Image: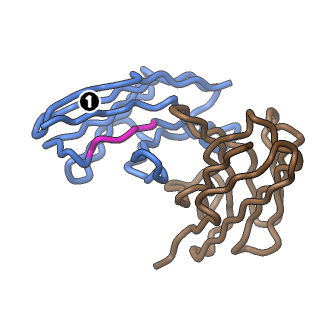
Chain colours: A blue, B brown
Amino acid sequence: GQSLEQPSEVTAVEGAIVQINCTYQTSGFYGLSWYQQHDGGAPTFLSYNALDGLEETGRFSSFLSRSDSYGYLLLQELQMKDSASYFCAVRDTGYSTLTFGKGTMLLVSP
Amino acid sequence: DAMVIQNPRYQVTQFGKPVTLSCSQTLNHNVMYWYQQKSSQAPKLLFHYYDKDFNNEADTPDNFQSRRPNTSFCFLDIRSPGLGDAAMYLCATSTSLGDQPQHFGDGTRLSIL
């Protein structure tokens, strides 16, 4: 089976930097994805890491350490519109589908 | 714009009355997925189609069925909805199985009376 752990809620202020951690346990591992979901909306893809290291896309960066079964999403220069739920998801080599974590609700305040 | 479209956005049905949710895509992706998402929970995969090959998750209730008559359309049928089936149902697509990203529709929120 697969399991993912991420914090349930994170709060921050506009302009700050926040890191959302994700640890996972899988029988096999292809990669770690991050999705953003605003309340009542569709999940939207943010990033995918298959190899160790940092991937940067604008204000968002994602990091993976395969040896530690750990990754994080880094959000910089936070804006109010970044208030949303963030899900990490693993692609398992055995299943080739995604298993999502329970999500982290990010609340950005002025 | 190429996209994934789900209809309707909101669906209300009665306990035990069959209901069908629809999803269409203009991305020409091979894989279509159906997820169930309950309030403040992670999306849970129900099943997926890789072209015409249907794959059911082991813990998906028999009450849930799916049809994919062609590449563009996929349907979720709930034969006898129970109160526990009230949720957001999300359709997603990807070019191939496991490929990232998955493209999600806006979902159908199903309520059971």
Along the horizontal axis of the image, is A83 left or right of A33? left
Residue B77's x, y, as percent? 82, 55
Q: Is residue A16 above or below residue B81?
A: above
Residue appearing at x 61%, y 50% in the figure: B109
Q: Secondary structure at mark 1?
A: strand
Q: Which residues are magenta?
A: A82-87
Q: Is residue B87 left or right of residue A77?
A: right
Q: Chain of mark 1?
A: A
Indicate the position of residue A96 as horizontal and vertical percent values.
66, 44
Total marks shown come to 1
Examine the structure image and report whether residue A1 is included in the region drawn in magenta: no
In the image, is residue B23 above or below residue A86?
below
Front residue of this view, candidates B21 and B95: B21
Task: Tell which of B13 and A78 is nearer to you.
Answer: B13
- Screen quadrant of the C terminus of chain B: top right
Location of mark 1 (residue) = A19
Q: Residue at x 53, y 58 (%)?
A: B106
Location of residue B47 in the rendering, given as x and y in whole percent from the top left corner = 75, 48
Residue B10 found in image quarter: bottom right
- Magenta-highlighted stretch: main secondary structure? strand
